[in-house]
């Protein structure tokens, strides 16, 4: 039997060993670079039982993608053995993500009689580091960063005993032989080791200091969540002024004191992936205002390694646990780098001597429309593949610009990288290059083409152009460009087995290919192609992407589209009155001529415009901040909607928000509460989407793009469409935002290459 999928590092071989023993079958099992191979010998009925039970009773953390069975002549095996891994051959085995500490290990860590009592690196076959320690496949200890720790006799015995929970647990370790903690000061001077290091680190947090903690996939910066001065100082030093900071609570009870935890959220928080989950904030959460200023949600996670469990239980209070980096740079993974890059940020460093093979941030998810939706896909999820409906050529897709991820296809699988980040710093570009090299090495992949966004100025696009022009291993390969919103649509479709749909693809910005900036698109099609059947009414946006940080510019520009220079007569509206007299003439000129004011159909900018008119956030410090405020402001009792008429062709239909803006302005002037304005605006968008869907008539509708991180918009649009008889497809595996683009790029490029082959 050849078993493919996520079958290594999950206790698959010991499971096979026990199953063969149960059925009294002889033979052997082996890990190789593609999966798990088994030969068993015995009476046919028991072999059939073996085949069925292997699938039915597979280990909890494994995923079987396929099983191939062949009947062989008897070989005369005696007994059943686990053979040494075979390092040769094609590398398609699924490398597993890191798994949060299991209950058995946790019980040992807090059992004074156990030899692993208070040991921060306890793990077993069911939990512990995987992706963050693997350096090569197959997944065996010499191929991990744990190879520098020879196992003590007791660990060795567990590792070799098929009845033990740690049988072939590659990172197996104990206080006698494994990694240990140290506490160092900002100059790297050793202050304490082992239990003492943990104790002094905890005391420092209690005293309001900023602690850097080396975890699974990088460093966290930790301060007490209730300590306003410490949080403010952390923000100042990190250069992260308004983006919400993630919290870690000791357990589910602690999480419930911070935010509303329903059954779905509880499952996600306490699950093996243990992501940061966005929870509606409790009014008496007791966290410092600076943790998530003006935000009705808190991002909360639970401890996912024994180290975090020990620290959090010792402290007894929730902490801020945010990535150890400067704002928007990738997370630090090694001590030397951390001491350098976090110099002036962290007061103390709680570190350990198990090297981290690659950076993996915390994942972020939200419960939207009844399901867990990833917002950032990293620890616990990466690099698990998405399975396509058919095998595709080997392709490397380099993603978009913000929230970048890359993807590599192999057969039916698309391996998705961990979150890399915004491609705006040399550090981010460095991480991007490392991830690509890492993926190509790990899978020994030889792509037939490199896929990138249609935007010529994205750093990822330029990198792809240079890579194929260069001498490296991608040199000479063809390039394939994929339109941004088509990639969004194809990404969601790929998660749902392919096919065709109407894609409501709404985000902040994407290169349209017609000289305009798209972002409020309705694309009808599949991975092979699309027709732009409708879009939001375009308007000229002075400064283009620079306007992202200034929602009042979107407000001005959208109103100018409707009213021209009469817009300045609306001086009673705060968002417009705030433009200085000297700014007005140049802005009018840009708007009139289109010079440095590209036309856009962006839904994100329409959110910004309405938020600014409603008096929320004339300026923001990160994209989507104003839209988030507007979403959170929605008064759930508001059932009516602003007008958003749909105008028919020729050409694509247009959703005209002109009357909507007039109505917003009227409401704002009359002092209608912001919650009502926000409610009517969201309802208008939902009705607009329903009108286009009805006009197009395609039975399946995809909701994708960064705007569908908005829970109110997504849930209302999905419910409205379903009431009208449409089947709604939402993202489950990859983010609706640009973190999902690389998957869509692979799907589109593969469809093109296969289509070319078929027509040839
Ligand atoms: Zn465990
Ligand atoms: Zn040991
Ligand atoms: Fe996008």
Image (cartoon, rainbow, N blue to C red):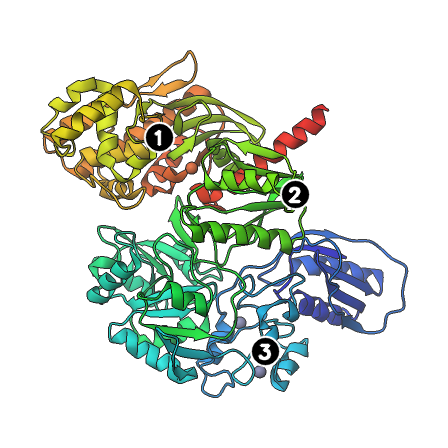
Considering every residue shown, the one lying at the far top of the view is 650
Image coords of residue 513 (percent x, y): 47, 25
Q: Which callout, 3 or 1, points at the residue further toward the start of the chain?
A: 3
Q: Which callout, 1 or 2, points at the residue further toward the start of the chain?
A: 2
The answer to whether mark 1 is within 8 Å of ligand 3 is no
For label 2, the crowd category at 10 Å Cα-Cα, with few meaning under 14, some 14 to 19 and many 20 or more, is some
For label 1, the crowd category at 10 Å Cα-Cα, with few meaning under 14, some 14 to 19 and many 20 or more, is many
Mark 1 sits on what residue?
602
Q: Nearer the viewer, mark 3 or mark 1?
A: 3
The answer to whether mark 3 is within 8 Å of ligand 2 is no
Considering every residue shown, the one lying at the far front of the view is 471
Q: Is residue 482 left or right of residue 519?
A: right
Mark 1 lies on a secondary structure that is loop
Mark 2 lies on a secondary structure that is loop
Mark 2 sits on what residue?
447
Which residue appears at 22% of the width and 38% of the height? 637
Task: Point out which mark residue 149 bears.
Answer: 3
Q: Nearer the viewer, mark 1 or mark 2?
A: 2
């Amino acid at each position: 039997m050849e078993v493919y999928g996520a079958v290594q590092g999950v206790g698959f071989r010991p499971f096979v060993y026990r199953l063969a023993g149960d059925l009294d079958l002889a033979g052997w099992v082996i890990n190789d670079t593609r999966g798990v191979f088994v030969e068993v010998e015995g009476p046919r009925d028991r072999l059939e039982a073996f085949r069925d039970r292997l699938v039915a009773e597979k280990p909890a953390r494994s995923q079987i993608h396929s099983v191939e069975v062949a009947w062989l002549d008897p070989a005369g095996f005696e007994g059943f053995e686990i053979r040494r891994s075979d390092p040769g051959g094609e590398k398609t085995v699924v490398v597993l993500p890191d798994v949060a500490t299991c209950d058995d290990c946790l019980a040992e860590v807090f059992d004074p009689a156990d030899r692993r009592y208070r040991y921060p690196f306890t793990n077993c076959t069911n939990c512990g580091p995987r992706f963050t320690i693997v350096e090569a496949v197959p997944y065996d200890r010499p191929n991990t960063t744990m190879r520098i720790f020879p196992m003590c006799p007791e660990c060795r015995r567990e590792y070799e005993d098929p009845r033990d929970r740690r049988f072939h647990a590659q990172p197996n370790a104990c206080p006698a032989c494994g990694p240990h903690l140290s506490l160092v000061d900002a100059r790297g001077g050793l202050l304490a080791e082992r239990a003492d290091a943990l104790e002094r680190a905890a005391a420092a947090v209690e005293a309001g200091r900023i602690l850097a903690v080396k975890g699974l996939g990088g460093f966290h910066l930790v301060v007490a969540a209730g300590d306003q001065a410490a949080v403010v100082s952390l923000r100042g030093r990190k250069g992260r002024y308004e983006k919400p900071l993630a919290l870690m609570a000791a357990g589910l009870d602690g999480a419930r004191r911070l935010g509303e935890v329903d059954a779905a959220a509880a499952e996600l928080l306490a699950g093996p992936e243990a992501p940061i989950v966005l929870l509606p904030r409790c009014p008496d959460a007791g966290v410092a205002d600076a943790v998530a200023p003006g935000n009705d949600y808190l991002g909360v996670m639970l401890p996912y390694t024994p180290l975090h469990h020990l620290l959090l239980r010792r402290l007894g209070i929730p902490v801020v646990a945010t990535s150890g980096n400067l704002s928007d740079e990738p997370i630090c993974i090694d001590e030397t780098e951390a001491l350098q890059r976090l110099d002036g940020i962290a007061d103390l460093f709680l570190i350990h001597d198990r090297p981290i093979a690659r950076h993996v941030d915390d994942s972020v998810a939200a419960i939207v429309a009844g399901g867990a939706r990833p917002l950032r896909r990293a620890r616990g999820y990466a690099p698990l593949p998405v399975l396509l409906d058919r095998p595709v050529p080997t392709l490397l897709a380099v993603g978009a610009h913000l929230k970048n991820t890359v993807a590599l296809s192999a057969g039916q699988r698309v391996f998705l990288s961990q979150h890399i980040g915004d491609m705006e710093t040399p550090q981010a570009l460095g991480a991007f290059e490392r991830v690509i090299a890492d993926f190509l090495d790990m899978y020994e992949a030889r792509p037939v083409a490199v896929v990138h966004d249609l935007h010529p100025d994205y750093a990822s696009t330029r990198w792809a152009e240079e890579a194929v022009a260069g001498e490296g291993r991608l040199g000479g390969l063809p390039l394939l460009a994929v339109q941004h919103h088509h990639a969004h649509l194809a990404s969601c479709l790929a998660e749902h087995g392919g096919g065709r749909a109407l894609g409501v693809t709404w985000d902040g910005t994407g290169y349209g290919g017609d000289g305009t900036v798209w972002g409020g698109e309705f694309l009808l099609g599949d991975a092979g192609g699309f027709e732009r059947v409708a879009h939001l009414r375009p308007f000229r946006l002075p400064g283009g992407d620079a306007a992202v940080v200034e929602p009042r510019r979107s407000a001005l520009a959208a109103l100018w589209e409707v009213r021209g220079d009469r817009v300045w007569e609306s001086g009673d509206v705060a968002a417009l009155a705030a433009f200085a007299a000297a700014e007005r003439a140049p802005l009018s000129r840009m708007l009139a001529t289109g010079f440095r004011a590209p036309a856009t159909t962006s839904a994100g900018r329409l959110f910004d415009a309405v938020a600014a008119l409603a008096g929320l956030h004339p300026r923001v410090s990160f994209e989507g901040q104003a839209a988030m405020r507007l979403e959170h402001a929605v008064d759930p009792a508001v059932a009516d909607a602003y007008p958003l008429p749909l105008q028919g062709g020729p050409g694509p239909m247009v959703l005209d928000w002109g009357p909507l803006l007039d109505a917003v302005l009227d409401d704002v002037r009359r002092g209608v509460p912001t919650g009502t304005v926000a409610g009517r605006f969201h309802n208008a968008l939902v009705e607009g989407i329903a009108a286009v869907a009805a006009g197009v008539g395609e039975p399946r509708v995809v909701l994708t793009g960064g705007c569908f991180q908005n829970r109110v918009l997504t849930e209302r649009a999905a419910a409205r469409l379903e009431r009208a008889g449409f089947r709604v497809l939402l993202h489950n595996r990859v983010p609706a935002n640009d973190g999902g683009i690389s998957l869509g790029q692979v799907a589109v490029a593969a469809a093109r290459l296969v289509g070319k082959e078929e027509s040839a």
